[in-house]
Amino acid sequence: MPILTIHQSGYAGNRIASLSWLDSSFDNLFYGVRRFSIFKQFHHRNTSGNPLTFRSAMAEGNQQPHSISSSQHVVICGGGVIGVCTAYFLAKKGAQVTVVEKTAAACAASGKAGGFLALDWCDGGPLGNLARASFQLHAQLANVLDGESYGYRRVDTLSVSIDEKDRTDGPSAGRVSPPEWVNGAVKAVKPIGSTKTTAQVHPELFTKKILSTAVEKYGAKFVIGEAQELQVELDGTVPRVRGLYVDGGLIEADSVVIAMGPWSATNKLVSALTTISPLKAHSIVLRPKPESSITPHTLFLTYKTKEGVSMDPEVYPRPTGEVYICGMSEETTLPATADQIVPKKQSIDMLKRVAASVSTHLAEAEMVTEQACFLPCSEDSLPVIGKLPNVEGAFVATGHSCWGILNAPATGAALAELIADGAATSVDLKAFDPARFCNPVTAYFGLS
């Protein structure tokens, strides 16, 4: 079955195309793809097809901005933090919103990430304004949505150097002493963030709070089901989204947002345009005893094993009394669904070893969770946010890598503006525009 199947609609003069997520044939749809060096690094990339790019009135700047009405329906594919933040801000604007999720809300990286937030760590680069806007939005949301209920708090952040070979007890060799609970093989400590510039949330609780508010307060809908095909109307020069097939049934829509993290690449409009590569990240969650001994200091480690291997683990105490530790990542194949992800034993064992080296409180702590998730990484290390070229009503938001929790609110707010008003005003999305990957060559839908 080709990726593009033509059907007759129920009314004269229009034709409907069904764009499959899963089919690999490009018989009727052609795209242009700029290849970056990351293509060679991720050997699991599917390279089937010979895509070219087609232009449209939208790509040439002829599409006029429009305001959304309450009768317009937006379907969002993905129940992670990016998808639900987009749903929240769209529903708040009065749009009818349906979130479609295959497994469960916050079942992947949005539920297993660290939840660290930084105001200024992305300054000087394309992410700077997005990160600053999103850090402030996190604070505003916490005031409105009871941030304490999902673990929002300001934290002090330290860079901590640890060497397993040198376990000499005594004060830090740096200018700052570590918190009392950080009583392991510490060689140096340096402040890198304060309560003015760094904060945290529990990512799963945050994601579910945003989703429940969108549903309960603003009327959004949440559906468990598999996004299968986009229904696209072919009438005139610009193809337009008309719906999404979910578990075989059609949900009619004026716009569809693809926000499925690394699974966004299963959509052929996305994968033909650019590469979204999955990076597997491991983490553990511990519960120290007594819980009150752990202060709100997040730690970014420069860690050297006794074998001479250097790593950069991270340690996040949470207001729940738990401590989250991450830092082991690898390039590997993405499973079909989030519930099929299995952590690698060697990576988990290494994180346990790190925990014991940092603190006796962590060495003796109860193990709560051993887990892994996949981060979505783009070709140029920047998020992909905005209109998908040449299909009106198709949008994407993915590729946020390790900054997904931080940048989700500003991404959702800006994308909601783009969909509802025709332009994003809260944040400039130009650097993240999916069209940056296009080649200006002609293609077509192959209609006879």
Image (cartoon, grey):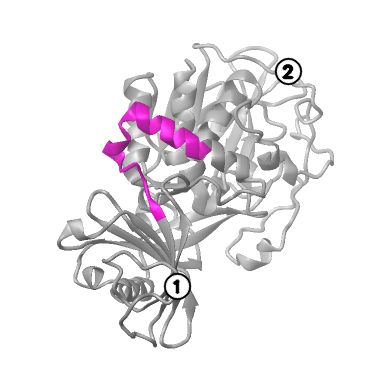
Please tell me whether mark 1 sits on a helix, a strand or a loop: loop
Q: Which residue is mark 2?
A: 64
Residue extending furthest front? 175
Q: Is residue 113 visible?
A: no
**Callout in the foreground (1, 2):** 1
Please count the marks in the image. 2
Q: Is residue 397 above or below residue 239?
A: below
Q: Which of the pair 264/23 is nearer the observer?
A: 264
State left or right for residue 200 relative to residue 15. left
Residue 249 screen position, x and y as percent: 44, 29
Amino acid of disc 1: Gly
Q: Amino acid at mark 2?
A: Gln
Looking at the picture, how far across and down is residue 386, in whole percent? 63, 34
Which residue: 69% across, 26% down?
239
For disc 1, the marked residue is 174
- Residue 376: say if magenta: no
Q: What residue appears at the point 41 percent right and 47 percent down from the top-left corner? A: 195
Report which quarter residue 242 is drawn in.
top right
Give residue 348's mark: none
Which of the marked residues, 1 or 2, is nearer the chain's N terminus? 2
Question: Overall secondary structure of the magenta stretch?
Answer: helix
Which residues lie in the magenta part?
134-156
Q: Secondary structure at mark 2?
A: loop
Question: Which quadrant is the N terminus positioned in?
Answer: top right
Q: Position of residue 205 (x, y in %)?
A: 31, 41
Front position in the image: 89 or 299: 299
**Badge 2 density bin: few <14, some 14–19, many ≥20, Cα 10 Å:** few
Q: Which residue appears at 48% of the width and 44% of the height?
A: 406
Which image quarter: residue 440? top right
Q: Residue furthest right?
A: 441
**From mark 1 to mark 2, how far is it between C-alphas?**
58 Å
